[in-house]
Amino acid sequence: MEENVSEENLEVLDESKEEEVLEEEKELTHEEYLDLVLHKAKEATRSLSGMIAMKKNAALLAMADGLEEAEEALLEANAEDLKAFEGDESREAMADRLRLTPERIGDMATQIREIAKLRDPVGESKGFWQRPNGMRVGRVRVPIGVIGMIYESRPNVTADAAALCLKSGNVCVLRGGSEAIHSNTAIAKVLGEAAEKSGIPEGAITFIERPDREVVLDLLKRDRYIDLIIPRGGDALMKTVNEHATIPVIKHDKGVCHVYIDSDVDLAMAQRISVNAKVQRPSTCNAMETLLVHEKVAKKLLPALAADFNEARVEMRGCPKTCQIVPEAKPAEDEDFGQEFLALVVAIKVVKDIDAAMEHIHQYGSRHTETIVSKDYDRTLRFLREVDAGAVMVNASTRLNDGYEFGLGAEIGISTTRIHARGPMGLEDLTCSKYLVYGTGQIRE
């Protein structure tokens, strides 16, 4: 006679089995460990790639609920990561990118729900055309497959990447930085469990829990399992990926973003945009790092702007003309222009005209986000046409270069690569296409 097992006892049995699996995984070499988890990830593509939108959306909603329900546990895990930053002011920018709050956890859940509302790009087609032999040909959007994300600091990337990949029918393999290992592991566990309970295959959300650098180097060569690598981080990470990857890469590089204040300008608007671009969240890649000001408005704008920056405790590093107008500004070094500070520091340069501004951006920019603040129609058109970046903006803060702000629901990152996708990468950018052909017995003559 079978013994009755309560739900509570089943949970205990499941937890015990999970602990046994984890103990077995600890005994594996990193090559064996990757073989195990990547095989599961690749297998998951078979059912996930063709899954209907309704089922994926239900899983996304369950994932969002799971994050909110696990708030206390997520904050505790995050506190473990933040211990390494205590008392180190020089690493405050990184700590800010890493820090979770109830509001930020709520924002992660909200963004996942927004993704669930978005149109599913998988299966979309612009139609079919008929060839002279009667054959009908068309293209449809399909998932890329297995996407490997290698990223630093931001735990929200774990949630955004998992949600966007799932909605677009892709399996994600997530490898966050060691500085956020507790936070990312906790978030991935919540998301994975909620997704699997909703019918998503095991392995669809795979998190690489081993922080060893050797694991990353091996991961970059697993082209048998992974179809695309998306790195998000600093110069060291990008260099590692470029040197070792045998898999196609879409880079999400640093953001050396400029705001150029033109001569014909609404000064109040220019002041508001400049302050927001630098101060609203300085540790992000779309924060302004260099302010360029036309010489005709510099004496009017810079003193008022300096007062705002001083109030926000922004350190100003200026060219000689800037330091004459704003005595409290520190003289800028050559390396300050082209620097991604990711902190309350801004480089300021007074320029002769728009040509000098665009030349400076061409020399020092990272092709991420560039803004002109101007009332002159012709000059704004020139700026839009001639400045090369993933997003070129008129009369708007650089902080608005964001997948959510652009109506994409969220983003897997802001691509600085020219091929396949550029700028904020949303659902459509996580798909490719395949041809469908309908024949009636045609052969090639």
Image (cartoon, helix red, strand yellow):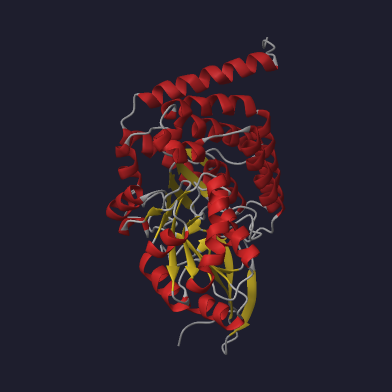
The answer to which of 197 and 364 lies nearer the viewer is 364
Residue 201 percent coordinates (x, y): 57, 41
Check the picture and name the quadrant holding the N terminus.
top right
Q: Is residue 167 at all visible to an observer of this figure?
A: yes
> Horizontal placement of 75 versus 366: left or right?
right
Q: Is residue 425 at all visible to an observer of this figure?
A: no
Quick one: which residue is furthest to the bottom in this view?
A: 132
Residue 111 percent coordinates (x, y): 65, 47
> For residue 377, which quarter of the picture?
bottom right
Residue 379 percent coordinates (x, y): 55, 80
Quick one: which residue is furthest to the left in this view?
A: 243
For image coordinates 63% across by 54% down, the residue present is 404
Residue 212 percent coordinates (x, y): 33, 34
The answer to which of 311 and 211 lies nearer the viewer is 311
> For residue 141, which quarter of the picture?
bottom right
The number of discs equals 0
For image coordinates 47% across by 61% down, the residue present is 325
For image coordinates 61% across by 36% down, the residue present is 196
Position of residue 299 relative to residue 153, above or below, is below
The answer to which of 40 and 313 lies nearer the viewer is 313
The answer to which of 138 and 280 lies nearer the viewer is 280
Check the picture and name the quadrant holding the C terminus.
bottom left
